Image (cartoon, grey):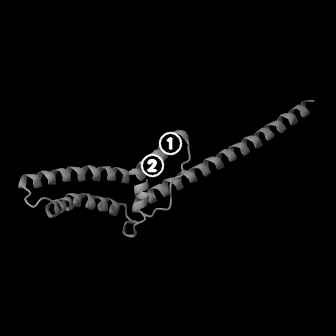
């Protein structure tokens, strides 16, 4: 969630989850290019074509690994929301999801949090109503039984 939180502070990424993905992917795609430029400009003056190809291949593999790792971290809000919903469904544990984010993942977490909170309110109201009705029915049944005994006597 920390990477998601940090990317959400960048103004042009704040309102779009897709932009966050595109930004990370854009940076990841350009790591090999930047590395190749530094290799050619600051490296040995007589770099062989094989060393350039090998360096580019290594940089591409490294950038792909880093990009996949960062994208996995960026998916964390979806995983957190899914886990919170699953925990509520199975154990009725009310989560504390963040609700301040304005992109699609943030709205998803806010909607899940709101739905769970509203559901808990309805469950508590239903339990209060059942308690009240059962109490009233017991009182009514007790009064009827007492009246029947009085009539019989």
Residue 15 versus residue 116 in the image, above or below? below
Residue located beneath label 2 in the image: 80
Across and down, in percent, residue 37 comes to 17, 63
Residue 4 versus residue 141 in the image, above or below? below
Farthest right residue in view: 153
Farthest top residue in view: 153
Q: Earlier in the sequence, mark 2 or mark 1?
A: 2
Camera-side residue of 132 and 24: 24
Give the side of residue 144 with respect to residue 70, left or right: right
Residue ID at (44%, 64%): 102
Give the side of residue 11 with respect to residue 139, left or right: left
Q: CA distance from mark 2 to mark 1?
A: 10 Å
Across and down, in percent, residue 83 comes to 46, 45
Across and down, in percent, residue 87 comes to 50, 42
Residue located beneath label 1 in the image: 87
Camera-side residue of 41 and 14: 41
Mark 2, Cα crowd under 10 Å, few <14 / some 14-19 / many 20+, is: some
Check residue 37 in the rendering and tell me which mark sits there, or answer none: none
Give the side of residue 51 with respect to residue 84, left or right: left
Specify the quadrant of the image occupied by residue 142: top right
Mark 1, Cα crowd under 10 Å, few <14 / some 14-19 / many 20+, is: some
Q: Quick one: SS at disc 2?
A: helix
Across and down, in percent, residue 100 comes to 50, 62
Residue ID at (66%, 44%): 127
Residue 16 versus residue 152 in the image, above or below? below
């Amino acid at each position: 969630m920390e990477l998601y939180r940090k990317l959400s502070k960048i103004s042009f990424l704040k309102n779009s989850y897709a932009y966050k993905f595109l930004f990370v992917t854009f940076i990841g795609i350009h790591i090999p290019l930047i590395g190749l430029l530094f290799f050619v400009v600051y490296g040995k003056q007589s770099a062989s074509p094989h060393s350039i190809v090998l360096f580019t291949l290594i940089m591409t593999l490294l950038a792909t690994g880093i990009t996949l790792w960062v994208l996995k971290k960026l998916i964390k809000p979806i995983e957190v929301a899914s886990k919170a919903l699953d925990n509520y469904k199975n154990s009725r544990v009310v989560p504390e999801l963040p609700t301040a984010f304005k992109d699609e993942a943030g709205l998803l977490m806010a909607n899940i949090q709101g739905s769970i909170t509203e559901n808990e309110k309805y469950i508590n109201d239903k339990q209060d109503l059942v308690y009240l009705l059962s109490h009233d029915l017991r009182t009514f049944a007790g009064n009827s039984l007492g009246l029947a005994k009085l009539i019989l006597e």
